[in-house]
Image (cartoon, grey):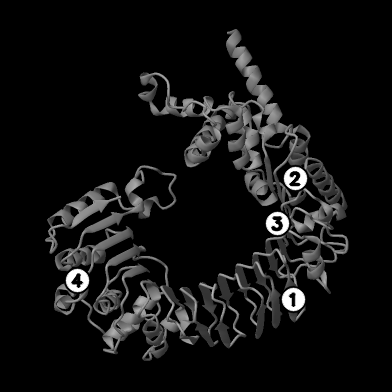
Amino acid sequence: MGTQEESGKRRSAVWRHLSCFGLGGQNPTCCCRNSQVISRRLERLCSYNSHVIKEQSNGIRNCSSGSTNTKHKGCENEQEDRITQLPDSILIRILSLLPTEDSIKTILIPRFRNLWTFAHNLDFELDSYRNRLAHKDLGDWSVCEKFVNLVRQVLIRHDFPTIFKFRLRFSDDQARRTEFANEIDAWIGYVFRKEVNVLVLDFYSASSAADTEVCYKLPSYVLTSNCLTELELVHCGVNSWEEIHLGSLKSLSLSGILLGGDAIRKILFGCPWLQNLSLYKCCGRQSQLNITSQSLRSLKVDHESILRIKISCPLLKTLSLIQCRGLSEMNIISCLLLEILSLIQCCGMSELNITSPNLKNLVVVNDPNSRIEISCQYVTSINISGWIDGVALSNVSSLVDATLDLSEYSYNGNGEFREVRMILQMSHHVKVLTIFDRLILVLTKVELKRLRCPSSNWKCLILKTRLTKRHLPGIASLLRNSPSLEMLTLYIQPSNSTSCDAGDRWFQSYDIYGERFWNLEEQSFDYFTKHLKTVTLYGHVTESCVIHLVQFLLKSAMVLEKMVISSPKWNIDPNCQNDPNHQNEKTFDKMQEFSKKLSKFPRASTHAVILFT
């Protein structure tokens, strides 16, 4: 009887403790249920980070070691052992990976006690907190007050001498209020006294064009810290960039922060070891951007008003220009180490001449109705997506790997697709080609119109697509024109995918026999079937068109060595009601039926084996 009373008192004390943070349940009896939920979450996290635990345990005995009887205990005991036998240092690391609200609730688990107060990372997000309180129907002001109290109480009780990462995501509308702004100032001051290394302050705004004159003002000492190594600021005001000195900063991300005049020059001067710089909607109405740095290795710029950009960074390796729609001039000076260049919807550029011998990777996402000519003499890997009709390639002899993903605009065209066929012609010599759904449908149109498609020397062909009867002629065209193909990989999306289905009426004028298609086409694959050695299928492999394709490949590939079939549904518990895609998942029985069919299919190669993973 005494034990029950003590247990009841403890549950009430824990509930009162959580109530201080605004995290208490409706009554103390919810503690046990919450404890089980948190335990399961921690168990999954332990499994996911097992390699981290092993590396940091420094010889601590394996959780599953001990008597042989322990290894044969039930699942519940194994879960208990894996948690309770871990040392405090590992448990604290695990808690540091959880959202702070969840790590606080581990006080419900006796083994954890107050370990959450030693977490290295503190992560607070107002939207997440608001969603948790949605059932209480509180006003925005009340939610913000409770959230502020949560952060305040956590910081008061935090016992670790340092903080590695502090992340705060708070509504800009509320951060403008004096009482909340003063609280935020106090929080930032506290984490700086604990020598925070990574600081993320995200004052998101509901409006698309935020007013930088009235947003939360950043304390000036944030820009003079020698402890910060990473800093991310979203929509907050900076009084002056004159005194910036961040001697240890290596990564800086600015979003929605007005950088007028020569602010960028001052930032780069005040951050002598800066390696990564991201600027998102920060340049105001500036038409020209000059970046000069002796330490910068990665640069990302996202701003529509930029017309000209000049970059002089001898150590720069990665450059990404995103939605710089007016960009017409790009001057890259002394960037001899540049390896990766990404141009995402930079439709103002009409010509790109790549002369750097180290620039090996090029990513281009082209806007509709924009055209760009690219000379890529030294590029070995290219990824083109969007309006690829408007991309003209030259000097592509060094290409080894090409990825092509067509936009819906090109897909709707009913012409002769000269540009698409030209890009395939220009990439005929690459070793690895990756093609997506819409381009395969275009190739189906090319095939049905009996237009000529170039022969290629691809060794490896990767298709990421649905697989319906409308895709079959396009895939057949690719296989027929790949006489040297040795590896075929398919990532199969569900046929009921919401991907673009425009142009279906066009296909209705043609008879495509899904079940008999490969039998009718069998005589036209003399060359590729003599070299194909490996076939790999991922995803929705039990689709009917997939089965017919697999049957054809097994029957035709004369030197096939192995066929690997990997379905994400294979390890799904069909009785798991918590799976949001449960109704769409293939059952284990259907996979068994599929494997039985495969075992009965004739094989042209006596050495071919089928592996399920």
Q: Amino acid at mark 3?
A: Lys
Tell me the SS state at disc 2: loop
Q: Residue at x 63, y 28 (%)?
A: 107
Q: Secondary structure at mark 1?
A: strand
Q: Secondary structure at mark 3?
A: loop
> Which residue has dot 4 on it?
529
Foreground pick, 586 / 65: 65
Residue lying at 57% horizontally and 27% vertically, measured from the top left: 87
Give residue 202's position: percent from left, percent from top. Answer: 72, 56
Residue at point 31%, 53% (across, down): 586
Return the x and y of residue 607 as percentages of the image width and height: 15, 57
Left or right of 535? Residue 47 is right
Is 352 on the left-hand or right-hand side of 484?
right
Disc 4 is placed on an element classified as helix
Nearest the eye: 327 or 491: 327
Image mark for residue 196: 2
Q: Residue at x 16, y 68 (%)?
A: 556
First of labels 4, 3 by sequence position: 3
